[in-house]
Amino acid sequence: MSPSVPQATAAPGPAGTAARLDALRGPVPPRSHDARTIAALTVNPGCSRRAVLDAAGVDKRKLAERIGFPARYGQSPFAITRGLAFEKQVKADNCAALLELLRAEPLRFDVPEHEYVDLGVEPEADPAAPVNLDRAARYERTRQAFARVAAGEPLLADHPLLRLDVGGRTAYVEPDVVALSARPADASASAPARLYVAEVKSFAVIDGQADPAKVGAAATQAAVYVLALRRLFTELGVDPAIVADDVLLICPTDFANKPSAHLLDVRRQIAAVERQLARLPRIGALIADLDPAVDFDLAVDPPEAKGEPGREHRSAVELTKSLTMIEARYAPECVTNCEMAFHCRSEARAAGAADALGRSVRDALGGIESLSEALEIADGTAGAGSGQHEAARLLRAAARAYDEALRVAPRAAGGSEADG
Ligand code: SF4
């Protein structure tokens, strides 16, 4: 009997998609999305490779290491430890420091007394020996807590777990945030209190200024939380506008560890995240089109004898081959947003892809995909395709200007030598 040719074009159902994604990852625990990964995902929503790896929960950092292109970005262990210590300080004594910051200058929020609820632990357990809840229980507690907030109870919700649809799959986001019912100082007394998301970050604000890139990243992450919280209120039948467009950024001030609170308007980031999430490819359709041989099993069996390496389920060559079977859309922004960037950049350069030079070049080339094709059109050895005439005209003009510059340069150099 001849082998059957897969006809997988119809998207599998949710159970089929989940099973295929689990099989892609192999017998290792999945990596969860968080606000940081969702924010990064929206930087390059057209990349199927990243969408599949993230949906399958593949550890991209480990995958990049295994194929010889380790990622060179991310927080150092020192920064992570410092961040956790600062967060602990802000949240000590049921977030007393946080409430104090909101009531003090410059914010002067009208903040009622709040009941503090830690949604990450078993409510009946001894506080001295907290029992962490699993994801399902934690999400259910979060729903119940926010239903109480919607009914007007001021709850200070610590460790809530929220959900967001990412490419047709449910992703859980785990804010290190606290949601507060508060009223800004300039609001009228009759204005309803709104719910604020607080994002605790350990980068310093010095003389009132912080690193704009870090503030931008924090704003995008906070926007993911605002969006997820608004979706939860919509599900609860409550106007999502209860969640404020401003978020509270809590950072250490100057060179001390003294926390300060800053109000950030994240309307632009919310709109951007919403737009990009809507553009993400549906994961079921991507999975349906995937070659059955694609496999990112990163498991390593224990060594058979002491001192020997463990047996890798998939070699670097097999993992690289699987990657090449999923379309990528490399752009220079990938370097600071995706662990696979060095592999994808090398692949894009080897293929002479115009994408490797960035979005502005890709847009200017108007549908000319490869640099070799662009060069051929520029020197007239290839014709422009339909819709590429404007790009071709610009390329030929640039080629003429370049040739002219090369002709003039030696004359100018010769002239200056003679002058000297
Ligand atoms: S680095 Fe590669 S996988 Fe990651 S978003 Fe860019 S192109 Fe996609």
Image (tube, rainbow, N blue to C red):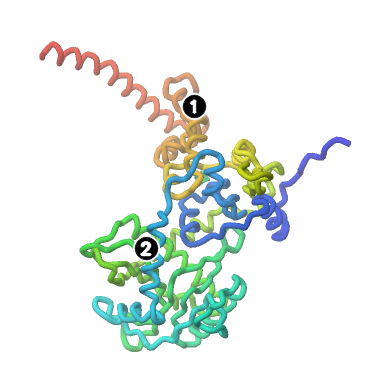
Q: Which label number is shown at residue 82?
A: 2
Q: Residues within 10 Å of mark 2 (few under 14, many from 20)?
A: some
Residue 308, given in percent of the width and then of the height, sits at: 63, 41
Task: Indicate whether 346 appears above or below 335.
Answer: above
Which residue is located at x 64 percent, y 49 percent?
A: 299
Which quadrant of the view contains residue 187? bottom left
Q: Left of 4 or right of it: where is 43?
A: left
Task: Indicate whether 86 appears above or below 387.
Answer: below
Tag 1 secondary structure: helix
Residue 368 visible in this rendered orientation of the protein: no
Q: Left of 105 or right of it: where is 225?
A: right
Query: Which quadrant does the C terminus fall into?
Result: top left
Task: Indicate whether 330 appears above or below 89.
Answer: above
Furthest-right residue in this view: 1
Mark 1 residue type: Glu
Query: Which quadrant does the N terminus fall into?
Result: top right
Furthest-front residue in this view: 306
Which residue is located at x 46 percent, y 87 percent?
A: 152
Mark 2 residue type: Arg
Task: Indicate whether 385 appears above or below 36.
Answer: above
Q: Nearer the viewer, mark 2 or mark 1?
A: 2
Residue behind mark 1: 373
Tag 2 secondary structure: helix
Q: Earlier in the sequence, mark 2 or mark 1?
A: 2
Which residue is located at x 15 percent, y 16 percent?
A: 416
